[in-house]
Image (cartoon, rainbow, N blue to C red):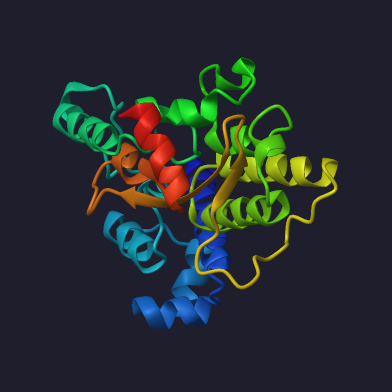
Amino acid sequence: MTAATATGTAFGSLLRDWRQRRRLTQLDLGLQADVSARHLSFLETGRSKPSREMVLHLSEELDVPLRGRNELMMAAGFVPAYTEHGLDDAELGEVQRSLRRILDSQEPYPAVLVDGSWNLLAANRAVALLTDLVDPALLAAPANVLRVSLHPRGLAPYVVDLEEYAAHLVSRVRRQAERAASTGLRALLGELVGYCRDAGLDPTAQPHDRIVLPLRLRHPDQELALFSTVAVLGAPLDVTLEEVAIESFFPADDATAAYLRERFA
């Protein structure tokens, strides 16, 4: 096998994977991208080598995340199209400071900053409401907020509606894993499903008659109820910035709001 063929095959395999994950046939993608199905077939089998512009065009049509677009570019023999900075890099300094301000302004309610695999990057003081209930070993870096949520030494023993809440988290990760380029989410999904099965829970259970599914905790002080929102950056052009998100928790009842104000004000 020549180097050119090997490169084409690597690109073709990735392209086929993304096309199938989007549940598109070659004809479907061809019509959507204005590319012949025959040419797509040649790209997927390595008989044709894509141009840089074609890689970016197909990535856009398949809604591939930036990390995946870089992988497609490199598989086709090109340099990555998008940067990937560390969150502590000077280039992201202003963004990092803004994210920190968002976390702090959420107090007295909890908020966490996570990466694309739900690993904890930062948190505000009020997150102690949750972490105080967790085995400290689970909080060693890189702590994963979804692992902490469903691990038997994490929050799971304190969650009132654990089956529904666990199924919600599993469903969330399954949807994200379908879209994401990182294999870390797929491994995390298997881990979370394992926790559900070990606890005798149905990971496919669906919430009943709810507007929003709250996290209800048997906290040592009193039962607490929280719901959350997830915010992402608009129009990111860096892999790191596309993947980070802030999950903010809000009280779902007056008693929880009063408790949080008293504890973290």
- In the picture, measured across the screen, residue 193 lies left or right of residue 139, that is right
Q: Quadrant of the C terminus?
A: top left
The mark total stands at 0
Would you identify the image quadrant in which residue 71 lies?
top left
At a point 52% along the width and 31% down the height, the residue shown is 130
> Percent from the top left, x then y, of residue 178?
56, 57
> Percent from the top left, x then y, of residue 262?
37, 31
Examine the rendered structure and indicate whether residue 222 appears above or below residue 167.
above
Q: Quadrant of the N terminus?
A: top right
Would you identify the image quadrant in which residue 213 lies?
bottom right
Q: Is residue 45 visible?
A: no
At a point 45% along the width and 41% down the height, the residue shown is 116
Examine the rendered structure and indicate whether residue 142 appears above or below residue 228.
above
At a point 46% along the width and 25% down the height, the residue shown is 128
Between residue 225 and residue 236, name the one nearer to us: 225
Examine the rendered structure and indicate whether residue 76 appears above or below residue 209.
above
Between residue 139 and residue 69, name the one nearer to us: 139
> Percent from the top left, x then y, of residue 28?
48, 81
> Percent from the top left, x then y, of residue 183?
57, 42
Between residue 216 and residue 88, name the one nearer to us: 216
Q: Is residue 215 visible?
A: yes
- In the picture, measured across the screen, residue 184 lies left or right of residue 100, that is right
